[in-house]
Image (cartoon, rainbow, N blue to C red):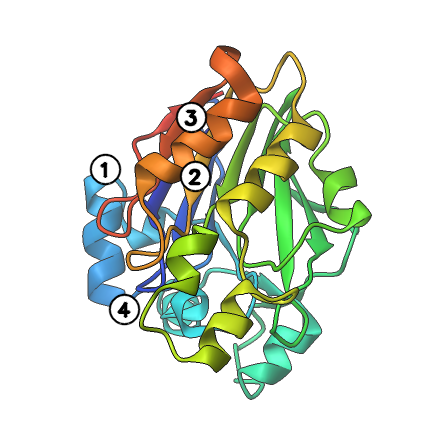
């Protein structure tokens, strides 16, 4: 199994997960760009929109839902999301392509097993997920204010984690954001700080955790080197740390 983040941040989020074999299954997790921009980002990954076999939407915020409904309808791609997310986007007619995802109910996509799980975030019914092929397990965890025991449970035994490192607490506190937005971002239903992300990484660490990708890094309230340093202090040298940028995401990562 391998994956590539196509871009991560407040301007848009999307990640492709691809199984191994001669006929790989490709899952697009979130779709927070316009159709043209998504196609361009997929092209940089040597893919086209028609190569996507399934879409999973974590929640209804614009930087995650993006062109998901248009992409699904244009290419006949099934799209999974929670009932709450579907209602939050005003229940569009998806022509039979809608699939409702539920907390802790596995979704089988060929050899890929997708496990959604609930997270605390200021959305209608947000879900994050793990993706597993054989013994290889990837978690995608962004857009949450804190890690519950339920979240930590689902992160166990992962070989790789795409992990939100949204903000440095000091940078957020001293930023030009209005007070209400600082409280929202730093609150229990907002986004993870570097320190909170490092704590989650520490709770999820084990000898086979190969890779952590710092994602959803705020361009105003964080720095890639701050996020990486915070993770390094917890994970040490045995786990590779990479960064997903808003412009290019990250390279293809193999598990």
Which mark's residue is nearer the viewer, 2 or 1? Answer: 2
Asked where in the image residue 100 lies, by quadrant, the reply is: bottom right
For label 3, the residue is 241
**Quick check: 18 above or below 235?**
below
- How far separated are the C-alphas under marks 3 and 4? 29 Å
- How far separated are the C-alphas under marks 2 and 1? 23 Å
Tell me the SS state at disc 4.
loop
For label 2, the residue is 214
Q: Residue at x 52, y 77 (%)?
A: 94
Which mark's residue is nearer the viewer, 3 or 1? Answer: 3
Name which of mark 2 and mark 1 comes first in the sequence. 1
Name which of mark 3 and mark 4 comes first in the sequence. 4
Which mark's residue is nearer the viewer, 2 or 4? Answer: 2
For label 1, the residue is 46
For label 4, the residue is 34
**Quick check: 16 above or below 170?**
above
For the question of whether residue 189 can be seen, the reply is: yes
- How far separated are the C-alphas under marks 3 and 1? 24 Å
- How far separated are the C-alphas under marks 2 and 4? 23 Å
């Amino acid at each position: 199994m391998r994956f590539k983040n196509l871009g991560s941040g407040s301007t848009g989020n999307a990640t492709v997960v691809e199984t191994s074999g001669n006929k790989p299954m490709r899952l697009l997790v979130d779709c927070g760009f316009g159709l043209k921009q998504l196609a361009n980002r997929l092209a940089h990954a040597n893919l086209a929109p028609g190569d996507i076999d399934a879409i999973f939407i974590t929640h209804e915020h614009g930087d995650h839902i993006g062109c998901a409904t248009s992409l699904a309808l244009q290419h006949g791609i099934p799209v999974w999301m929670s009932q709450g997310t579907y209602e939050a986007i005003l229940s569009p007619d998806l022509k039979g392509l809608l699939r409702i995802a539920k907390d802790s109910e596995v979704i089988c996509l060929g050899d890929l097993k997708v496990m959604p799980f609930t997270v605390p975030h200021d959305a209608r019914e947000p879900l994050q997920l793990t993706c597993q092929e054989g013994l290889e397990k990837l978690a995608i965890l962004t857009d949450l204010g804190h890690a519950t025991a339920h979240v930590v449970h689902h992160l166990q035994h992962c070989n790789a984690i795409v992990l939100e490192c949204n903000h440095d607490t000091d940078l957020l506190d001293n930023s030009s954001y209005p007070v209400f937005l600082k409280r929202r971002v730093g609150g229990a239903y907002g986004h993870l700080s570097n320190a909170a992300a490092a704590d989650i990484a520490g709770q999820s660490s084990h000898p086979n955790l190969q890779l952590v990708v710092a994602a959803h890094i705020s361009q105003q309230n964080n720095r890639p080197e701050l996020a990486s340093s915070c993770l390094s202090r917890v994970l040490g040298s045995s786990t590779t740390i990479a960064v997903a940028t808003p412009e290019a995401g990250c390279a293809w990562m193999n598990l």
